[in-house]
Image: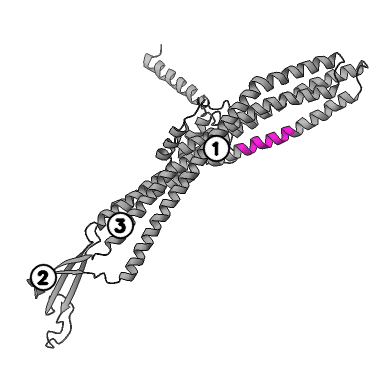
């Protein structure tokens, strides 16, 4: 009998061999819902990553904005000829008549360093808001692209179902023609209708393909990378009577693009204050040991400052800073007005899309379905011609496509509203 330990070892070896022989479970393809795409895009989109790096660079600038400049060390060799007594000139500090060392530190006028820090901080927040605005814009494009992907995919499925139905209608027409009940033209018209439907299918397949390419580009994936079939759209929030005043207030406080413009105004205001501070002088402070031979036998201190006499150029700089502030304020106001207008427009369009979907789902589609069933029964009984039957079939497809288009439009408008508000609803 084999030892128990050897049996355990052989069993473990067999288990590991079977484990490694099993096929690896692949990660599920993105694309079945919009959440899977958003999760992938947050880290993969190169444009968004570039904005993050720029924001990080702006953060690093805040650490140096208010720092003092590096000090300057000045060395002066005095009386290098020793009043003409030296036979040669030696530029070593101990051999000159005296050597003066001066350590100089530039000191800006009071408040300038704080203002520079404030400006850098406003620019950092502006960069962070640009990252947030970039993400909201990217998310809106992905949500809209996914809605188009879903609509085109579902329209392709519906059109293929219509093609199958048309094939069945052709069989009915062929059977009735064989019985001498209808002319041959009915079967020919069914075949012509199939050709037209196949042409529509080619267009829909192209639209689905292009939707995949656009989504893959946003996800930083190869253009032909596979995507899962779209399973469902996002649920629309309950907005029977949206409080536009509350939504406008949310836009003013949360929209990242508007926040970035506000930080631009803040930076411009601080820059204007800094220009006004240039009316006052900056200082250089220094301390100077004096070396004679190998010893330091004297010390000195120094202070120097610039004299702000060029008033005309300084006033021009102040007017420039004031104009830049006014421009930033005007740009912020223009951005806010445009965003509020976009919000009102998208809310109205969302409500219209919901109403259209409701009408198509509850009224147009059931009526078209009843009309087709009645036309089919009438054709089989010889009371309705084939052209009427085909028209009823087209109306049924149109009703289904109208529901899809309304759903896609609602998703697009919802994505725009969420982009404007800076949050998901």
Q: Earlier in the sequence, mark 1 or mark 3?
A: 3
- Residue 316 sits inside the magenta stretch: no
Q: 10 Å neighbourhood of mark 3: few (<14), some, or many (≥20)?
A: some
Asked whether residue 201 is drawn in magenta, I would say yes
Residue at which label 3 appears: 273
Give the percent coordinates (x, y) of residue 366.
69, 18
Q: Position of residue 119 (x, y in %)?
A: 32, 53
Is 98 rendered above or below residue 348? below
Tag 2 or tag 1, which sits nearer the N-term? 2
**Is residue 32 depicted above or below 41 in this figure?**
above
Q: Residue at x 83, y 30 (%)?
A: 192
Residue occupied by mark 2: 300
Magenta region: which residues?
200-211
Label 3: element kind: helix
Spatial CA span between label 1 and label 2: 73 Å
Which quadrant holds residue 350? top right
Per the picture, the main secondary structure of the magenta-coloured stretch is helix
Separation of residues labelled 1 and 3 (CA atoms) = 39 Å
At x 27%, y 61%, the residue is: 277
Q: Residue at x 38, y 62 (%)?
A: 320
Q: Which mark is residue 207?
A: none
**Furthest residue in direction right, as rendered:** 180
Q: Nearer the viewer, residue 321 or 69?
A: 321
Q: Which residue is disc 1 drawn over?
A: 345
Taking depth in this image into account, of 24 and 253 the one nearest to the observer is 253
Residue at disc 1, secondary structure:
helix
Q: Position of residue 310 (x, y in %)?
A: 30, 71
Mark 2 and mark 3 lie on one chain; the one further toward the N terminus is 3
Cα separation between marks 2 and 3: 36 Å
**Residue at 83% across / 22% down in the picture?**
170
- Tally of numbered tags: 3
């Amino acid at each position: 009998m084999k030892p128990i330990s050897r049996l355990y070892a052989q069993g473990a070896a067999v288990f590991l061999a079977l484990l490694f022989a099993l096929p690896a479970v692949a990660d599920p393809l993105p694309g079945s819902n919009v959440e899977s795409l958003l999760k992938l895009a947050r880290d993969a989109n190169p444009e968004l990553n570039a904005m993050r790096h720029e924001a990080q660079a702006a953060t690093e600038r805040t650490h140096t904005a208010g720092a003092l400049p590096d000090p300057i060390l000045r060395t002066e060799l005095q009386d290098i000829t020793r009043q003409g007594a030296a036979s040669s000139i030696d530029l070593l500090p101990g051999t000159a008549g005296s050597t003066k060392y001066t350590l100089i530190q530039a000191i800006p006028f009071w408040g300038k360093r704080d203002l520079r820090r404030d400006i850098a901080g406003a620019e950092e927040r502006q960069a962070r808001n640009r990252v947030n605005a970039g993400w909201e814009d990217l998310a809106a494009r992905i949500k809209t692209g996914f809605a188009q992907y879903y609509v085109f995919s579902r329209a392709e499925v519906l059109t293929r179902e219509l093609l199958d139905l048309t094939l069945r209608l052709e069989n009915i027409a062929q059977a009735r023609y064989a019985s001498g009940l209808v002319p041959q033209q009915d079967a020919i018209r069914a075949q012509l209708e199939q050709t037209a439907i196949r042409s529509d299918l080619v267009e829909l397949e192209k639209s689905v393909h292009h939707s995949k390419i656009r989504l893959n580009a946003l996800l930083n994936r190869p253009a032909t990378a596979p995507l899962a079939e779209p399973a469902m759209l996002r649920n629309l929030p309950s907005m029977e009577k949206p409080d536009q005043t509350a939504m406008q207030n949310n836009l003013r406080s949360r929209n990242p693009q508007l926040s970035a413009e506000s930080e631009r105004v803040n930076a411009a205001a601080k820059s204007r204050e800094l220009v006004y501070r240039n009316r006052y002088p900056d200082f250089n402070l220094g301390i100077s040991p004096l070396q004679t031979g190998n010893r330091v036998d004297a010390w000195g201190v120094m202070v120097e400052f610039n004299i702000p006499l060029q008033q005309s150029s300084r006033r021009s700089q102040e007017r420039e800073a004031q104009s830049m502030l006014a421009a930033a304020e005007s740009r912020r106001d223009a951005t806010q007005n445009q965003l509020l207008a976009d919000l009102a427009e998208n809310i109205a369009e969302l409500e219209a899309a919901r109403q259209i979907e409701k009408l198509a789902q509850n009224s147009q589609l059931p009526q078209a379905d009843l009309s087709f069933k009645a036309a089919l029964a009438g054709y089989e009984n010889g009371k309705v011609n084939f052209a009427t039957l085909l028209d009823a079939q087209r109306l049924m497809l149109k009703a289904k496509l109208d529901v899809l288009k309304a759903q896609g439009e609602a998703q697009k408008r919802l994505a725009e509203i969420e982009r404007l508000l800076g949050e998901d609803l």
